[in-house]
Structures are given as structure tokens and as C-alpha cells.
Amino acid sequence: MAYDLGGYVDVPTRLRLALKDWPKLRIQETASTLEQVGEQLFLVCVVTVWRDETDPIPVIASAAEQIPGRTPYTRNAERMVGFTSALGRALGYMGYGIDKSIASHDEIKHRQDSPEDPWPLTEQQEQKRALSQIVEKEANKRKIVSSQGPMTVPQQKMLKIQAKKAGIADDEGLTLFCADALGKDLASVNDLSKLDASKCIEALIKEAGSKTAATEVEEPF
């Protein structure tokens, strides 16, 4: 299905607009976690944006990227795509590039300046943010309890897939890799919890990506 992207604004444009208003703006790639929805894994990336060093309520936004990526452009670049998408949403929350949608797209060429000043937050916005933070905190508590259970079958399969991409040929090598990634002794990968399995999968994705990058540098043609 083809989408008309004519009214959307890409992330670099949103960032340039924000930096024009807030020259001391700072961005942090705050967190990235793996979450499972049914049989599918997603990399959830979180960014925090401070308008300046005195900003009491920074903008926090997240975006989920499917793993593995569904297109040649996102596969093996899920972290970069995820953080870029999260930044686009954060800048959208600040009022930049939302004439048509909060979503952004790097292929977009058209934008109309927003007449509204996104700062400061109104009392109603602050109340909504506080409520959202309470809801998110409770949700995180439930996630922590859930993450303490044993890893799932899809996680086991993903470990094997990513281990192969990272050049790890057997279970012993995978166990050693996971133990090193977690910083603790591990008798077998079968002993991993959901949370530990997610951390190991993410570490394997990074390892596979670094090997791919090294190969491209050594053999550019």
C-alpha cells in the first residue's frame, strides 16, 4: 500500500527547527529494551529531550521497531531506526512538524510552520504528563514481575538465529557469550529468564552488526 507522505516532516527538519528555538537542546538515547508481543519481538527505544540545562520537564518518547526488520532498510539497523523514530515523536510532542501527524518520515519534503509555541506546558498538560508517568510506572512494575519468568520459545529461537549471525556455532559458545553479556555465571542458556534472554538477544544483535560493519570495511566491493 502506497502512502501519501506529502504532509509529513522528516526528523532532521524537526531537529533543525527545534535547535533554532532551543540552541542548547540536548538529546539522550535513554534506553532500549526488547519486548515480546505474541510471537513477535520488538526493540523499544526511548529518548529524552531537554530544551536546555534548566528544563524541569524534559520530553520523553519511545518507538518500537520490529526485530528482525521487515525491509532491507531496517534489517540489521533496528536500533538506529528505532531511536530516530523515537526522536521524531519527541520533537513532535514539542510541536515540531505535526501539521498532519505526530509521525515523521525521512522522505518528506513539505512542512508548514506551527503557529503555536510548544513551551511552556499548560497546567492541563502537566497534569496529563503526571498521570501518564503514574500509569507507566505501574506498567513497568508488572513488566518486572513478568520478566522474572523463564524465557519463551520465541526467545530461544531468536537466540539461535542471532547467535548464528554473530558467528557463534554451538551452545557452549552461546552460553559463554551470554554469561559475559550478563556479567554473571551461567550454566546453560536454558536457565535464562525472559529479561536476561532479552539482554542477550540485544547483545547478539550488536555483535552481529559489528561483524557486518567490519566485513563491509574490509571488503567494500
Image (cartoon, grey):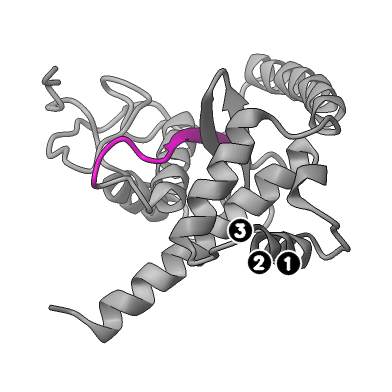
Identify the residue at image location x=22%, y=82%.
Answer: 219
Label 1: element kind:
helix
| Residue 83: x %, y % from top left | 47, 47
Q: Which residue range is magenta in the image? A: 61-72
Q: Is residue 79 left or right of residue 60?
A: left
Q: Nearer the viewer, residue 123 or 100?
A: 100
| Residue 122: x %, y % from top left | 62, 21
Q: CA distance from mark 2 to mark 3?
A: 14 Å
User: The disc labelled 2 sits on which kind of residue?
Assistant: Gly
Q: Nearer the viewer, residue 50 or 142?
A: 142
Q: Dot 1 corresponds to which residue?
A: 176
Q: Of the numbered discs in the image, which one, if any, rests on residue 173?
A: 2
Label 2: element kind:
helix
Identify the residue at image location x=81%, y=25%.
Answer: 146
> Is 3 located above or below residue 22 in the figure?
above
Earlier residue among tags 1 and 3: 1
Check contact, mark 2 vs mark 1: CB within 8 A: yes
Q: CA distance from mark 1 to mark 3?
A: 13 Å
**Per the image, is 6 magenta?**
no
Residue 176, quarter of picture: bottom right
